[in-house]
Image (cartoon, rainbow, N blue to C red):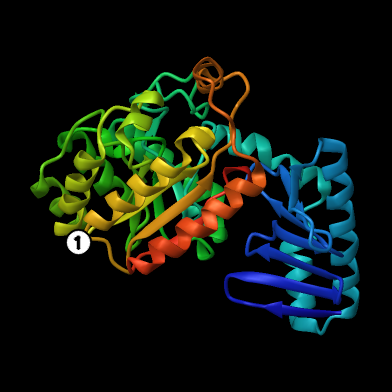
Amino acid sequence: MRAECREASTLLHPDPAHVLSFDREGRLYTFYDDGVLYKRALDSSLHWRRRENDGPRERGVLAEKEARAVYEKVQSFVNRGVEELEPECARRLAAEVLPWTPERIMAEKQRFDAVYRPIAILPPDQYFSIVVQATEGCTWNKCTFCSFYQGRPFHAKNADELRRHALAVREFLGRQLLLRKGVFLGDGNALALSRSRLLPIFEAVREVFPNRAIYSFVDLYSGERHDPADWNELRRLGLRRVYVGMETGLDELLAFLNKPGSAAELTEFVRELKAAAVSVGLIVMVGVGGREYAARHAAATIDALAQMPLDERDLVYLSPFIEHPASQYARDRLEAGLTPMSGEEVEAELQRLALQIRALGTRAARYDIREFIY
């Protein structure tokens, strides 16, 4: 039995087949259990992932009864650690981790629900940020493929509401703040708020979470369009990267998805952000439009990206397209006679696009929405 008592976390190594990590509040963070990796979300749902041999990666979320059994197994390892480790780490385990019984850790859902509304999605590099929900829902919410915000009207907090929410987030996270460096301003389109509403929100975030970089989504096609001076001011207040659902560089396909705008508009928007020294994260859906659109989607997307002043600070996410059977997209695809790409075809296309994007001097990374966790 070994342990690592770090400033921001506690790691427990019972044997080569098991590794556990805990935040400084003592709450489970991850648990590697002989080939299966469990990750606890802040609402104490337990997400699992595994890959056997060279097969596809499997993933899911445990039912409550199954999650309880895993938490009981975790507690048994902690009990062993308290008994077997040298005094310093044993004391930390006893003081911080041992009090988190399966009942108490599962009750974190109630605390989470008192602080947050459902968090639909984040960019992968923001899974470890502090989410502050300046808004709920999405200003557009009409893209045919998207189900993240269905049934949720758009709502924006004022500065006082935001400050109270941010303080509640800070209290809920506690010493887990040591693990979370930046602030992600949610939800789907927070930066679409007007300048007069955004500036007090940024000031409140800086007050509650000082000296932390700020990140957020924006949809340039809806909400308030900011001028270059606004982006410079937000950069001064901590904004470091803006994430945009580019989806595709093919205007025809954008229209099919009921997403307004064009590749030319996005290119100009990226230029404005880069002129203000704000980096960008562009999200491209691989496989959307099916086989019939695949070649034109890929060519137009690479061409659009090549027109943008991207550099090594920016990031292009390639997201395997997941079709929701009940979505408007699924109905439109059937009516248009489009053929879905197979999983193997999507993966091959993703790898090909990644190589082309990297050749442009920009980072490319995979973004699987099925692995989202906060």
Q: Residue at coordinates 33% horizontally, 60% vertically from top-left?
A: 213
Q: Position of residue 74 (x, y in %)?
A: 84, 59
Q: Between residues 231 and 86, which one lies in front from this camera angle?
A: 231
- Drawn side of residue 276 relative to residue 112, left or right: left
One can see residue 374 in this view: no
Q: Name the residue under label 1.
A: 277
Instruction: Give the class, few, some or many, for how many residues have Cα within 10 Å of label 1's Cα (few <14, many ≥20).
Output: some
Mark 1: amino acid: Ala
One can see residue 28 in this view: yes
Q: What element carries label 1?
A: loop
Q: Relative to 314, say whether 200 is above or below.
A: above
Q: Between residues 169 and 132, which one lies in front from this camera angle?
A: 132
Q: Relative to 158, say whether 11 is above or below.
A: below
Q: Where is residue 131 in the image (x, y as percent from the top left)?
A: 46, 46
- Drawn side of residue 193 relative to residue 175, left or right: left
Q: Position of residue 50 (x, y in %)?
A: 78, 56
Q: Residue at coordinates 38% horizontally, 28% vertically from top-left?
A: 138
- Drawn side of residue 183 relative to residue 22, left or right: left
Q: Relative to 4, say whether 177 is above or below.
A: above
Quadrant of residue 135 within the rendered picture: top left
Quarter in which the N terminus is drawn: bottom right
Quadrant of residue 198 within the rendered picture: top left
Q: Position of residue 239 (x, y in %)?
A: 27, 54
